[in-house]
Every structure is written in C-alpha cells, then in structure tokens.
Amino acid sequence: MYKHIQIATCAPAKEELLEVKHYFVNELELETEFNAGLFAKNAKLIIKDIMSRNKNVLIVGGSGLYIKALIDGFYEEDIDVSEIRSKLNERHKSEGSDALYNELMTIDPDTAAKMDAGKFRRVIRALEVYYSTGKRMSELQMHNVKPDFEAVQVGLLVKRTLLYERINQRVDNLIKEGLLDEVEALRIQGYSYKTHNSLNTVGIKEVFQYFEGETDKDTMIEIIKKNTRRYAKRQMTWFNADKRIKWVDIDAEFFQNWIYEIYFN
C-alpha cells in the first residue's frame, strides 16, 4: 500500500499495473496510519463499484487480519483518537509493551488473548478505542458491519521445503535489486522503523538495524530469511484455522483448471 518501498514489498511492476487494474498499491505516504478496519471499509466500496460493472473481484494477499476484516465484517465508526494515541505512544516509550498489554488484559481480556504483546500497535489500537468510546473492542466487534457479497477463499498449498527455498531466494533477489539502497534513502530522509509503523516490517527493519551497526551484512540477510520463514509459518497457522478456505496443491496438474472453475462458476 505504501509508496517508496517498492523493492521491500515486491510491489507489482509498472507493466503489471498497466496490464491489470490494481488497488491499494503505492497509494499511501509512509506517515499515514492504516489498519485492517480502514482497509475493509475502503475495499468494500471498491468491490461494490467493480461488481456494479459486472466484473469479478480477485482479492490477493497474505494478511489474514485484513482479509478477515473484509469478509467477516468490521466495526464502522469514525473516532478521533489522535490525542489518546499520542499519550499511549509516549507511555509505550516509557513503560514498554508489556505494561500496555497487561492493561489491555485487565480491560478487555478477550481482545488481549488474541494478540501478541509484542505487536504493540494493535494493543495501542485496542486501548485507544476503549478510551475513546468507553467500550471494549471485543464488544464493538459484535456489531461488525457485514459485507454485502459472498467470498470464495482459495489457499495455495506448497511443500514447506519448497516454500522455504523460495523465501530464501526471494531475500537474495531483494538484495540484488537494491533493497539496501531503498532503505538507506529512507534513513537519510529521517525515516525509521521505530517511528513509522509502515516500516516496522520484516525485510525493512532488519536493514535499518544493519545501518545502525547492530549486525553485519551477512547476518542481516540470514535474519531476514529467518524472520520471513517465521512469518510464513504464522500465516499458515492463521489460515489453517479458517475451515472455509479451499486448499489446492500448486503442483497438481488440475490446479489452473480448478481455479478457473472455482472463480467463474
């Protein structure tokens, strides 16, 4: 979604963008806050427009939370949380992630139980919603706005050994394509994964840490590979819990015909 990190995010090339209409690509500045609820709200409008033109919609991606927000509904309410968010960010700096997570656990244990304490942005989001509305996020989500379309979910199944080989090759390709130069340009402009949530992601924060002298180049590359493999494992854990997903082996001969039938019939 964000501009200026095309290499790091493997954004579609200009030729691909011209061939097929894409959405949520190179649209946001790095300072812009974005979340699953905003994605679901905006995507819902786009989907409605596309379907009104008798077109099929293909949603592609690996972020389970964003997909869930879209197809299972979301709580739709505009809340000004800028002042509260600022205070919570300051508290995070002084008190740390665990303190805020424990506070959320006291306020809204159902929501906290679904979160990793280290994902402090999500913890802060849940706290700011509570302090802005006086209601727990778990309570508000009971009134999610349901989408007015049905979705068919298809998961691509690949052997783990092959998946990890592809991940390792992908990281090597990112380095060759200029990942370090891309991140260095951002660092010179004053950006940091510590202050911009858009950059606090696998493949970017490790490069910042390299430039800050925390690792050497070879170690940085290996850490990116390791963290990407861990991310892929968490993705599979998330998606395996959703029994609506129809899994298909990408090595199967019938794969392309099967996708065609699912999508168009």
Image (cartoon, rainbow, N blue to C red):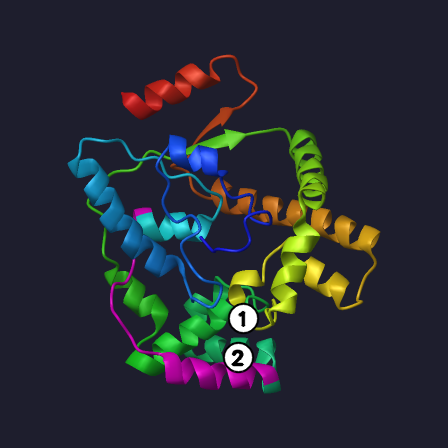
Measure the alpha-carbon separation of dots 1 and 2.
8 Å
Q: In front: mark 1 or mark 2?
A: 1
Point out the tag, 1 or 2, that comes first from the N-terminus.
2
The answer to whether the residues at label 1 and label 2 have Cβ atoms under 8 Å apart is yes
Few, some or many C-alpha atoms within 10 Å of disc 2 (few <14, some 14-19, many ≥20)?
many
Left or right of 186 in this view: 84: left
- Is 25 drawn above or below residue 50 in the view shown? below
Task: Give the main secondary structure of the magenta stretch.
Answer: helix
> Looking at the image, can residue 73 be seen?
no
Could you say where residue 115 lies in the image, as x and y percent from the top left? 51, 64
Magenta-colored stretch includes residue 76:
yes
Q: Residue furthest top?
A: 253
**As shown in the figure, which amino acid type bears the numbered disc 1?**
Phe
- Quick one: 88 or 134, which is closer to the camera? 88
- Secondary structure of residue under mark 2: helix
Could you say where residue 113 lies in the image, as x and y percent from the top left? 49, 65
Q: Which residue lies at the image location 67% right of the left edge and 29% below the top edge?
A: 162
**As shown in the figure, which amino acid type bears the numbered disc 2?**
Leu
Q: Give the magenta part as a residue range.
A: 71-93
- Quick one: 112 or 225, which is closer to the camera? 225
Could you say where residue 126 lies in the image, as x and y percent from the top left? 41, 72
The residue tagged 2 is: 100
- Secondary structure of residue under mark 1: helix
Residue 120 tag number: 1
Q: Which residue lies at the image location 70% right of the left edge and 54% below the top edge?
A: 180
Magenta-colored stretch includes residue 128:
no
